Amino acid sequence: MKHFISIHDITHEEFNQLLSLAAKLKREQKSGVTHHILKGKTLAMIFTKSSTRTRVSFETGIYQLGGQALFLSANDIQLGRGETIYDTAKVMSRFVDGIMIRTFAHQDVLDLAEYGSIPIINGLTDLLHPCQALADLMTVKEHKGRLRGLKLAYIGDGNNVAHSLLYACAKAGMDISVASPKGYECDSEIVKNAKEDAKELGSKIIMTNDPVEAITDADVVYTDTWASMGQESEKEERVKAFRGYQIDMELFGKSKPDSIFMHCLPAYRGFEMTAEVIDGEHSVVFDEAENRLHAQKAVMAMLMVGDSKNG
Ligand code: CP
Ligand code: NVA
């Protein structure tokens, strides 16, 4: 594993290793054991979109591992004034030991990886959000004791979070049903790749426009905002298009009696789910948010330990 850009690119063994390492790091952190395995290492964090969880969890995570982070907003670096990804990748590779990037175009992340010589971590693009899906399945495993054979229902926009959940469930041997309104379905190439990946452990992927079909008998119920970063101007039309896709107590009641509710956050109560659902007893959203820290520490440990910087 050289980069963490898409869960599709890693094997199911690597995915499991990340989950185990994340769980170990979490246990150790809770019992006061520290590992300064990234002592002297620097992670550059490039953000061209807002963030609470990703920024704070990466920054805290590398600090806990003995390294340091540089927060670089697009306004502060020359990338925001038109310097190329090519030059940015070459220059950063001379200074730092890894780059975490959150941006719009997925291709920019692929280009950073191609032109740079250090590990690249995808902190969210318009296409994928792999760190989120890793933390999500870590959370499912904590609550359910296993992943294989469980059913996750994603109700809502066929966006970056849905795409990474498709890949993660396929690698973990979990069934996934995605219900989105017409015109807001997942990218067909991603669905095709995930179906191919799912053959290895034999899990099922169902894509539908019917939220009831998707949620019935689900062990995990998941949703995300109807308007992602960059889609703010479409909010009104999206609210209309997603009518019927809100997870309220009635819809949630069709999942298994012991199902858990998940959301990557930030959440908008009264839109993609009611307050009763996200603030109710089945919700694990804050465990899920916490696990971003542990999951990403595992990613950094896997990618950045050793002589990762070679100019
Ligand atoms: N879930 C998530 O990535 O949150 P932030 O946008 O706050 O980083
Ligand atoms: N789909 C959302 C996720 C935010 C963490 C977005 O891209 O804005």
Image (cartoon, helix red, strand yellow):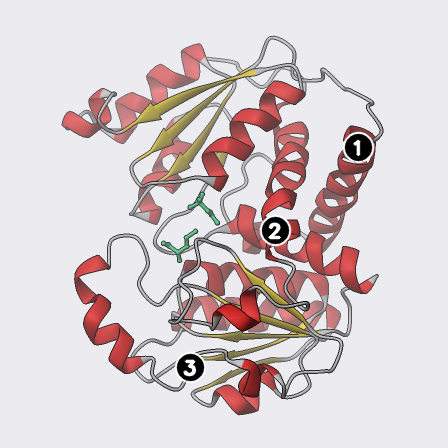
- Residue 309's place in the image compared with 186, above or below, is above
The answer to whether the residue bearing label 1 lies less than 8 angstroms from the nearest atom of ligand 1 is no
**Residue 168, percent from left and from top:** 61, 60
Q: Which mark is drawn over residue 286?
A: 2
Give the residue number, with chain letter if any, for mark 3: 245
Mark 2 lies on a secondary structure that is: helix
Amino acid, disc 2: Phe
Label 1 and label 3: CA atoms lie apart by 38 Å
Q: Residues within 10 Å of mark 2 (few under 14, many from 20)?
A: few
Ligand 2 position by quadrant: bottom left
**Residue at image point 42% right, 81% down:** 245
Label tally:
3
- Secondary structure beneath label 1: helix
Q: Where residue 30 is drawn, which disc sits there?
A: 1
In the image, is residue 247 above or below residue 45? Answer: below
Image quarter (top left, top right, bottom left or bottom right) of the N terminus: top right
